[in-house]
Amino acid sequence: MVLFTDRVEAGRRLALQLDYLRGQDIVVLGIPRGGVPVAFEVAAALDVPLDVIVVRKLGVPFQPEFAMGAIGEGGEQLIDESTVALTGVTDAEVSAVEARERVNLDARVARLRPGRSRIPLDGRTVVIVDDGVATGATARVACDVARRFGAENVILAVPVIAASTLAEMTGADDIVYLAAPETFWAVGQFYTDFSATTDDEVARLLDEAARRLTGPSGTTTPSPEAGVDDEVEIPVDVVTLNGHLHLPVSPTGVVLFAHGSGSSRHSPRNQYVADVLFEAGLGILLFDLLTPEEELDRGNVFDIELLGRRLAAVTHWLTERPETAGCRIGYFGASTGAAAALWAAGEPGTHIAAVVSRGGRPDLAGTRLPLVTAPTLLIVGGADITVLEVNREAQKHLRCENSLAVVPGATHLFEEPGALGAVAELAADWFARHLLPASTGAPA
């Protein structure tokens, strides 16, 4: 039984269940590593600080994936005595496993919080988030650690939790969840994409969350000399779309990000690429093509005409703003967002200067492909065989300047070391050539 596309979608759906906490003094704590992408979405939706709460599972020596307990920051420990008795693990073996995992825990804390202090929890409500709970040992230790650090109220929030664990779960004042199935083998069975989350991605999400909040109110005050760095609301038809507009001083080119299925403006991959493009001198508009309620209908996620019309409408909104009037406009699309970008670029009367597709489905733009006049770069992972063939076929229908760039060894999500960096460099070069003045030059 699959419930979620990936951790991003799960986090956004979980955030809707936690909306009642909005306006309270809250800190969201993600359990590394897989819980942090989920927690990032929750913290962003509630506009509150994000930190990690580092916990390590204690695995049975001869079957490490089978938990016999967990340890956490501050010396916290939980041992499941029934599991220890059942497996015959000795006290000496438990101590040896704990000593080893304590070293790993301390090292992970240092990697994830380099030069950053732990966010104070004294007297605050703490929402502890993971991507799912099977046995509950890790979650219970995380709750105990949060209380040790001064949390007044502890809420455990997860997309999915085993029904048997839910019935016996202790440590939290409240548990918020989306599903509690009776049949539960592993958290990954409930996700279409359960790719491993790296320490680098966790650190990047924490950095992004810290940049989002510059004070206790969670608001930013951009300096006029520094351009624009604003959360924006974009009225389109009968809905309002949320976005983030980041502009350098006197921008000449702006890139709009069209996200793919199950993704959002908080996608760490698109955030990473956006940062690289901004450093190259480009303005950025990250926004959601659908409202959270609309995303619950999976049909909307694959309605390319709907997404394309939304993108065209947002483009019109952007060009009507005084600070971006006259800017050259580019589209960066991922997955189905790439099809929406090409559909909108082929809309009669639009003037798009460049399009970049990352692991996209340009074929879904259908009859719009020959109408696209904007120079188009298709970036595909070399190991993403099916999508690579789809892009090669779609390229035959493009009549504009176009190029297909293959990142060797990369899979669909470009998770391999250096793969996403290669995407960002290719996109920055393409947009710099087509959106920035010739004197600016392309980035190295």
Image: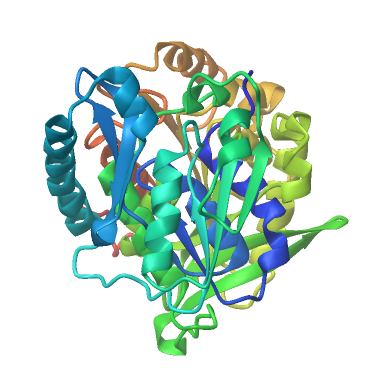
Q: Nearer the viewer, residue 423 or 32?
A: 32
Task: Name which residue lies at 70% across and 52% down.
Answer: 17
Question: Residue 162, located in which quarter of the rendered image?
Answer: top right
Task: Name which residue lies at 48% across and 44% down.
Answer: 130
User: x%, y% of residue 180?
Assistant: 65, 32
Q: Nearer the viewer, residue 183 or 28?
A: 183
Question: Residue 138, located in which quarter of the rendered image?
Answer: top left
User: x%, y% of residue 272?
Assistant: 37, 51
Task: Name which residue lies at 50% across and 19% down.
Answer: 185
Relative to 57, is 97 on the left or the right?
Answer: left
Relative to 403, is 101 on the left or the right?
Answer: left
Work out whether 14 lies above or below 48.
Answer: above
Work out whether 382 lies above or below 91.
Answer: above
Q: Nearer the viewer, residue 7 or 162?
A: 162
Q: Nearer the viewer, residue 346 or 160?
A: 160
Residue 264 visible in image: no
Relative to 291, is 6 on the left or the right?
Answer: left
How many numbered circles does the render carry?
A: 0
User: x%, y% of residue 106?
Assistant: 17, 54
Residue sitting at the far right: 238
